[in-house]
């Protein structure tokens, strides 16, 4: 993996040294931008995922439309409804949407620095001068004295000790720092990248929530299947117990045989409470995921449904497409772009600043003359400042920004590697589970056949109850393992879609 190129749009004489007069003039004319210009890093990626060979349904083509709502490929209306409800009402997604709105407001704040700041003001000042202020002699020079007219003095804007004056004012002032070297432009670029990062983080949350809902839903259906298997086994064993009790009355079996069958039945029933607790936990988890109280979906999910078969084609795609499809990768890249722009902000602090300020006011001692043109007063000023000595603080801030940019680069590269690993792991787990599932199907079929034979032989009196109990226990175990494998297969498929970045749409 190669690091980002970091050319500066406007290069100083030395590394971030203060500009010379010629450079300052060039900056004023050309409005150059300090700091590195961002370029997305070029990464070396494998041509394909190695584990695709383990999944016959994997396809090299992965259109975004197929991955945006991947759950529709299962044709399960209940799952689609839950996901629609979760993507609309999940509280984590609401918080992610709020963070996007905050980032966009911060972009507005950053952009406001390009323009002058204008403030309006209005006021009334009433002043009463002390007779003992020590300026009586001064006022007498102007013919004032202590007994002058209050109204005439106030009207002239000058008053005597012991009298009052009221002044009315109305105006506005403006201030503007000229963005000579592009520090504001870099801060806007950083805010834009952060806003885009928030959008991709929101989409990453959508991917995670979709996968979590689907996983909990498949786990619920798998538990329903396991409960169904146990109930069927309870029914068969109850029938066997009734048969044993009847045969005991006629002396064909001993009391020990009856107790053995009753113990087997009780052991099978003992599995039901744990399965029911796990089932209720999945119902509660789904309720919270869709933004409802835990028990809200109890009636909606009560009906037993089988796990759907896996889709005929899985749009895995190529590693190069993963960089555009995974929201967490896109978010990490935007974080890298923001950190690059912040280097320019730090560099800009080393350069001179020019501030322009101005104010226009209307001031009058009589309200009726406030809007007269003779009441106007104004001032305009400009200020130039340059950092001369900071004890290395400014350059240290630049170096900090550079190191933070390197950290963001490493984080981006690591996110890409983690994304590649997620897909390879998910493909491997799903491919291996397919093989395991096929073997368990055969084992379950053979175990059930053996149990049926043992049961018929017992009914014909060929053997005793021992082989029947052993065969039934083996058949139950194989069926339970197959049901658990079916659930794991669905969960692994969900993990694969999550690793591929499915579950979000540009809209």
Image (spheres, helix red, strand yellow):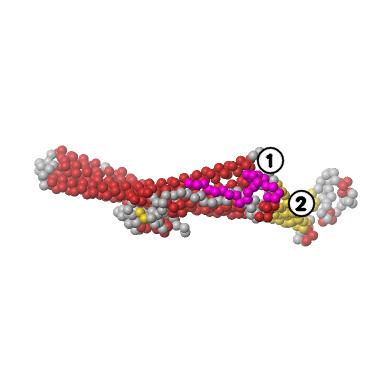
Residue 169 is a magenta residue: no
**Circle 1: element type:** loop
Front residue of this view, candidates 206 and 140: 206
Rendered location of residue 52, percent (x, y): 36, 51
Give the label on residue 126, or none: 2
On screen, residue 430 above or below 253: below
Residue on which the image places disc 1: 389
Rendered location of residue 354, percent (x, y): 70, 50
Q: Classify residue 160 as left or right of residue 425.
A: right
The answer to which of marks 1 and 2 sits earlier in the sequence is: 2
Front residue of this view, candidates 18 and 373: 18
Considering the whole magenta stretch, tell me its main secondary structure: loop
Q: Which residues are magenta?
A: 1-23
Judge the density around disc 1: few (<14), some (14-19), many (≥20) Cα neighbours within 10 Å. Answer: few
Q: Which mark is in front, 1 or 2?
A: 1
Q: Rounded to the nearest whole Å, what is the CA distance between mark 1 and mark 2?
A: 45 Å
Front residue of this view, candidates 284 and 174: 174
Q: Looking at the image, can residue 490 be seen? A: no
Q: Looking at the image, can residue 447 be seen? A: yes
Rendered location of residue 95, percent (x, y): 49, 51
Front residue of this view, candidates 35 and 138: 35
Q: Classify residue 160 as left or right of residue 106.
A: right
Residue 12 is a magenta residue: yes
Residue at 78% of width from left, 61% of height from top? 373
């Amino acid at each position: 993996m190669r690091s980002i190129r970091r050319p500066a749009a406007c290069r100083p004489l030395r590394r971030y040294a203060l500009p010379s007069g010629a450079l300052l003039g060039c900056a004023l004319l050309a409005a150059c931008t300090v700091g590195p210009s961002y370029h997305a890093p070029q990464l070396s990626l494998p041509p394909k995922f190695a584990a695709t060979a383990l999944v016959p349904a994997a396809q090299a083509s992965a259109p975004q439309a197929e991955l945006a709502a991947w759950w529709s490929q299962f044709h399960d209306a209940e799952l689609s409804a839950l996901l629609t409800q979760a993507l609309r009402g999940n509280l984590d997604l609401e918080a992610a949407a709020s963070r996007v709105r905050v980032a966009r407001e911060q972009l507005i704040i950053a952009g406001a620095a390009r323009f002058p700041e204008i403030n309006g003001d209005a006021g009334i000042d009433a002043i009463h001068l002390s007779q003992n202020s020590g300026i009586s002699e001064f006022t007498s020079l102007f013919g004032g004295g202590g007994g002058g007219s209050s109204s005439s003095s106030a009207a002239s804007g000058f008053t005597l000790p012991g009298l009052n004056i009221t002044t009315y004012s109305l105006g506005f002032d403006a201030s503007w720092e000229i963005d000579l070297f592009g520090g504001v432009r870099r801060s806007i670029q950083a805010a834009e990248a952060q806003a885009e990062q928030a959008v991709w983080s929101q989409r990453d949350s959508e991917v995670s929530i979709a996968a979590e809902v689907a996983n909990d839903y498949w786990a619920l259906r798998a538990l329903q299947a396991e409960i169904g298997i146990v109930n069927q086994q309870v029914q068969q064993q109850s029938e066997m117990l009734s048969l044993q009790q009847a045969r005991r009355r006629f002396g064909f079996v001993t009391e020990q045989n009856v107790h053995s069958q009753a113990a087997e039945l009780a052991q099978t029933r003992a599995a039901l409470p744990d399965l029911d607790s796990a089932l209720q936990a999945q119902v509660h988890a789904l309720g919270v995921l869709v933004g409802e109280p835990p028990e809200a979906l109890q009636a909606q999910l009560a009906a037993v449904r089988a796990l759907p078969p896996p889709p005929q084609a899985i749009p895995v795609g190529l590693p190069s497409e993963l960089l555009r499809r995974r929201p967490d990768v896109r978010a990490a890249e935007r974080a890298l772009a923001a950190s690059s722009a912040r280097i320019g902000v730090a560099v800009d602090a080393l350069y001179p600043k020019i501030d322009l300020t101005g104010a226009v006011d209307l001031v009058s001692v009589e309200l009726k003359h406030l809007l007269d043109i003779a009441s106007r007063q104004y001032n305009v000023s400009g200020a130039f400042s340059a950092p001369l000595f900071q004890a290395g603080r400014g350059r240290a801030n630049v170096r900090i920004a550079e190191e933070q940019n390197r950290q963001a680069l490493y984080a981006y590269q690591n996110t890409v590697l983690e994304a590649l690993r997620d897909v390879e792991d998910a493909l491997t787990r799903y491919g291996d589970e397919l093989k395991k599932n096929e073997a368990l199907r055969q084992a379950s079929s053979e175990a059930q056949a053996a149990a049926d034979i043992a049961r018929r032989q017992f009914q014909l009196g060929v053997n005793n109850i021992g082989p029947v109990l052993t065969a039934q226990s083996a058949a139950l175990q194989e069926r339970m393992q197959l049901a658990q494998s079916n659930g794991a297969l669905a969960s692994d498929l969900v993990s694969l879609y999550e690793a591929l970045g499915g579950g979000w749409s540009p809209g």
